[in-house]
Image: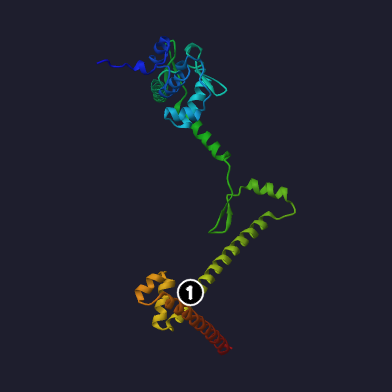
Amino acid sequence: MNEKSGLDEGFTQIPNKVITEIFIKGLLSQTEIRIVFYIIRFSWGFHKGWTNKCTVQKIAKDTGMSRRLCSTTINQMIRENKLLRNERRFKFNDDHQDWKEVLTNPDNKCSQNLTESVNKKEQLVLTNRNSQEPNNNGQITTLKNPKESIKERINKTERNIKERKTYITFNKQTFKFENIPEEKLEKWIEAFPSIDVEVKLKKMEDISRSVEEQLKKEVKENHMHQENVKKIINGAMCELNKEDYDILYELYFKNTPIHQLSKKLGISRSTIRYRKIKALEQLKSIILRLKTSKRREVSHKSIERI
């Protein structure tokens, strides 16, 4: 049987120096290789130096990566002269010596940076312990006293704390301004000589306290009003007959639909609507009567007190 090779379905010519000097030596990261292969496929694959006009979004979609990662990588490669761009057309620069910054394997670079930072920390610990370090000539030079360096750090942190900005706050529990520096007060007094700044601050604290007390009072009054309304409605509901009470309770307290209520009580929907209207009118008259009787009771109590 004659098996067809992959070349029969099409191929892209890539110079040997690109494969040996760039891909094999790992001068590109994994993400950069994906983008480079895409650009090579649509430029060298059609025997052209440049690709057709295409967007970063299309490259990201065809390569299966996020648009953000694709855009960041392409911009970085253009800055490093690995890619060339001209009016949304791209070209791969196969001359790696012309690149501005040739990156080795990023994993190796990360590990190299990590080992360098660890070595620096170990060197710092050793110098603090021994207070001595050999120079390039092999001679031992005495370093500064580590206690002095610690004192310098402490003084530096204290200076930073003093220079740090302090924000004026208002305590809602005590109704007083806090963290007002004396320098700030002096500046206010100089800027407003005709105004007693401390008195004004105290007035503002008193106003905020009175506003907070007024809000609490209004909330309490509203709560008492709601409780009174509930008591009146409950008392009026108790004066209804049982059937009207059940209808209003099911409709307004349990939110039962009329068709379910008709099945539950065994009466038609029109009957429920009619009895609901009558029960509401009766409930309204009972509430008005209870209100007037309550007002009379209050007036009688006030007269008795007098």
Residue 234 seen in this snapshot: no
Q: Quadrant of residue 253?
A: bottom left
Q: Which residue is mark 1?
A: 227
Image color mode: rainbow
On screen, 25 above or below 219? above
Q: Which residue occupies the extreme right position in the image?
A: 194
On screen, 134 above or below 297? above
Q: Position of residue 145 (x, y in %)?
A: 46, 25
On screen, 77 above or below 179? above
Q: Mark 1, residues whose alpha carbon is within 10 Å: few (<14), some, or many (≥20)?
A: few
Tag count in the figure?
1
Q: Which residue occupies the extreme left position in the image?
A: 1
* Quadrant where the C terminus is found in the figure: bottom right
* Quadrant where the N terminus is found in the figure: top left
- Which residue is at a point 48% across and 11% down the rendered structure image? 97
Q: Which residue is at the front of the view, 161 or 111?
A: 111
Local secondary structure at mark 1: helix
- Which residue is at a point 63% across and 62% down the rendered structure image? 207
Q: Position of residue 294 (x, y in %)?
A: 52, 84
- Residue type (three-letter) at the residue carrying disc 1: Glu
Q: Position of residue 57 (x, y in %)?
A: 49, 30
